[in-house]
Amino acid sequence: MTRILAFSALVLLFFAFEGSFFIQNSAISSYSFLFLEPSGNPQIIFGGGYIFSEALYLNRGADDGAEAGDLIVYGKNIAVGKIVEVFPKFSKVAPFSKFGEKTPLRTGDQKSVLFEGAGRGGGEISADFPNTIPINAGDGVYLAQAPSYVAGVIEYADKKEGRDFQKVSIRIPVSLNSITDVAIIKSNAAER
């Protein structure tokens, strides 16, 4: 309980003092007490299932070589989001499902259907497809620039007669509040 209260107080102060200034220059020289199981891998230290669920915070920053645009991957190939802000000791990650976040994606046989998905929040991405394109629930969705990384799974396709487009809902394959250890894929490596 004490850890939770200390963590909550730290988060409130973080947002009150612009994060970077407070953690670098105030009384907190080390924030390793935030981690239950220390790991050599980058870890999500805040976000996902908390109040500020549309942003994740990573315990790697500019001092560790993190850069804006770097891809965050969970497991071997699940793309979670991209780093949008970098501070010396930590980074802010925007999940692909963040409300309004536009992400180039691909699906279909041989991953040949390219489209833009729009984040709807809560782990959901939406897109519109022409009715002539066969889209099925359960089909995988991948990043357009790095098709080896899974961005989601088609949850349903709302195809109706008389409409030129079908509404498609995509669900990210993991719960953002269950993510801990991740990998950082450099933005220039993800584009190769």
Image (cartoon, rainbow, N blue to C red):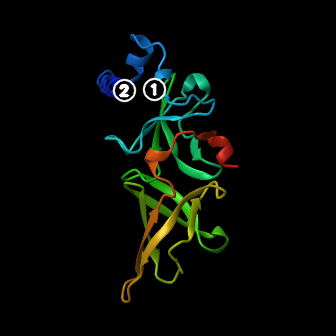
- The amino acid beneath tag 1 is Leu
Distance, label 1 to label 2, CA atoms, is 7 Å
Q: Residue 22 lies in what quarter of the image? A: top left
- The amino acid beneath tag 2 is Phe
- Taking 79 as reference, is 33 left or right? left
Q: Position of residue 76 (x, y in %)?
A: 65, 50
Residue nearer the viewer, 177 or 126: 177
Q: Position of residue 80 (x, y in %)?
A: 52, 49
Query: Quick check: 77 above or below 62?
Result: below
- Taking 15 as reference, is 73 left or right? right
Q: Earlier in the sequence, mark 1 or mark 2?
A: 2
In the rendered image, is residue 14 in sight? Answer: no
In the rendered image, is residue 166 in sight? Answer: yes
Q: Position of residue 113 (x, y in %)?
A: 58, 70
Secondary structure state at the residue bearing disc 2: helix
* Farthest right residue in view: 192
Mark 1 crowdedness (10 Å alpha carbons): few <14, some 14-19, many ≥20: some
Q: Which residue is mark 2?
A: 7
Q: Residue 139 lies in what quarter of the image? A: bottom right
* Farthest bottom residue in view: 161
Q: Mark 2 and mark 1 in contact (Cβ < 8 Å)?
A: yes
- In percent of the image, x 55 and y 29: which residue is there? 60
Q: Position of residue 81 (x, y in %)?
A: 51, 47
Q: Which residue is mark 1?
A: 34
In the rendered image, the quadrant that contains the N terminus is top left
Q: Residue 9 lies in what quarter of the image? A: top left
- In percent of the image, x 50 and y 44: which residue is there? 179
- In percent of the image, x 54 and y 81: which residue is there? 134
Mark 2 crowdedness (10 Å alpha carbons): few <14, some 14-19, many ≥20: some
